[in-house]
């Protein structure tokens, strides 16, 4: 696998050189990428390969950029492309390219694809803060899930149909009942006699994503729901579990010192979950711990591109409240972001060693 990725990187590099040479014969570029930008990409890739660092927003990225472990490249510290800034440098003495995605699955997917299309990237680390679906954990804990899923792709079933009724277009292979569903009447207020009544919203069935792997046949779809992180990357989690993390903001401290925890599953969707009923459903149905709006997009793009990846998410709140710390997310959000960065720094150092 490693040799194959190196060969792919070399082929990508040769393609970049070819494009630069072709563009060099003309004083004007007619493509989406200008001659000047292609030149810079060539110069950057000449020093590769890199570890890609993908982060949702400034709030989570700034602690990394301000760390003494990050050193920006002196000659070409960044490249701006398609509304994104790709920061070039070293982190724990490992060559990295850092990109901020912005909020949502779409932004995360676009940024991750651009990162891997433009640059020689041998792996991706995605990090940030997340809501927590597991009341056994607390604010500040840093979770590293083994699997990620996008839970925002639904087939919303018509009223009157049930679990044994075929979904619309299911027979064509477009949709499935394999993953499971949420029945909205289960969350209705009970009647006076303690029974629930049918809900016109009926049920929504969770669907796997259609994927088109880079080594697959073009336009021939595959499906993926649970996407595993890289096995080698995940195996390093045990070496992170004893890492000392911050527990106080000024004089306000958490009940216990936060910890690094390897968990089974994390989920993402274009939904900010601040509802305890849905949080409890996601935890019981999928055994999910971190809930966010970007990680599964990063996972799916890396899965399609056959790029090793891992996701590190620090818990900033118990989604929907319900704990003694439920109103203190604003207080500890900066702590959670810093804890995520501390784990990333240690992870990258372990990769380098």
Image (spheres, rainbow, N blue to C red):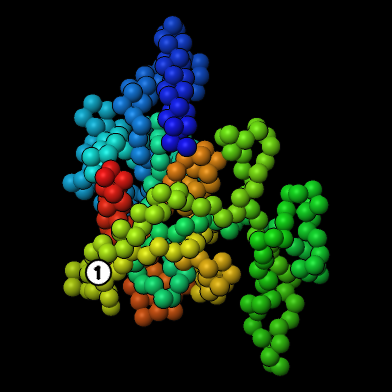
Reply above or below: 224 against 325.
above
| Location of residue 266 in the rendering, given as x and y in whole percent from the top left corner | 49, 60
Q: In which quarter of the image is residue 43?
A: top left
Compared across the picture, whether 328 is left or right of 162 comes to left
203 relative to 271 in the view: left or right: right
Q: Which residue is drawn at 34% across and 60% down?
A: 238
Please, what secondary structure does the residue beneath circle 1 have?
A: loop
Q: Which residue is situated farthest in the top direction here? A: 25
State left or right for residue 290 relative to residue 88: right
Q: Mark 1 points at which residue?
A: 247
Residue 163 horizontal/vertical position (percent): 76, 68
Q: Is residue 282 above or below residue 338?
A: below
Residue furthest to the bottom: 193
- Which residue is at the front of the view, 197 or 129? 129
Residue placed at 59% from the left, 70% from the top?
A: 285
**Residue at point 40%, 79% (across, down):** 323
Left or right: residue 20 versus residue 353 is: right
Camera sees residue 279: yes
Residue 22 point in image, percent of width and height: 46, 10
Image quadrant in which the C terminus is located: top left
Asked if one can make out residue 330 in the rendered structure from this viewpoint, the answer is: no
Number of marks drawn:
1
Q: In this view, does 78 lie above or below 332?
A: above
Residue 42 image point, x, y percent = 37, 21
At horizontal 59% and vertical 38% (from top left) the residue drawn is 213
């Amino acid at each position: 696998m490693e040799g194959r990725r190196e060969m792919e990187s070399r082929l990508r590099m040769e393609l970049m050189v070819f494009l630069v040479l072709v563009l060099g014969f003309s004083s004007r570029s007619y493509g989406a990428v200008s001659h000047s930008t292609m030149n810079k990409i060539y110069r950057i890739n000449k020093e590769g390969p890199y570890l890609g660092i993908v982060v949702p927003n400034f709030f989570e990225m700034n602690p990394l950029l301000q760390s003494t472990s990050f050193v920006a490249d002196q000659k070409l510290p960044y490249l701006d492309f398609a509304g994104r800034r790709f920061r070039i440098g070293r982190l724990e003495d490992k060559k990295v390219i850092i990109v901020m995605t912005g909020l949502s699955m779409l932004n995360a997917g676009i940024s991750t694809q651009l990162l891997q299309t433009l640059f020689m990237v041998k792996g991706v680390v995605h990090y940030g803060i997340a809501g927590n679906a597991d009341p056994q954990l607390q604010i500040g804990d840093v979770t590293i899930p083994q699997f990620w899923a996008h839970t925002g792709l639904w087939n919303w079933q018509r009223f009157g149909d049930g679990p044994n009724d075929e979904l619309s277009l299911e027979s064509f292979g477009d949709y499935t009942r394999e993953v499971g569903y949420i029945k909205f009447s289960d969350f209705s207020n009970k009647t006076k006699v303690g029974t629930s009544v049918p809900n016109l919203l009926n049920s929504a069935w969770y669907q796997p994503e259609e994927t088109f792997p880079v080594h697959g046949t073009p336009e021939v779809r595959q499906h993926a729901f649970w996407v595993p992180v890289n096995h080698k990357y995940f195996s390093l989690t045990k070496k992170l579990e004893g890492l000392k993390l911050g527990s106080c903001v000024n004089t306000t401290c958490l009940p216990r010192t936060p910890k690094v925890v390897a968990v089974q599953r994390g989920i993402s969707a274009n939904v900010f979950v601040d509802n305890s009923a849905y949080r409890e459903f996601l935890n019981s149905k999928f055994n999910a711990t971190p809930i966010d709006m970007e990680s599964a997009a990063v996972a799916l793009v890396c899965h399609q591109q056959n790029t090793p990846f891992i996701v590190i998410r620090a818990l900033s709140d118990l989604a929907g409240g319900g704990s003694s710390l439920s109103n203190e997310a604003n207080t500890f959000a900066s702590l959670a972001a810093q804890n995520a960065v501390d784990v990333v720094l240690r992870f990258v150092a372990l990769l380098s060693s």
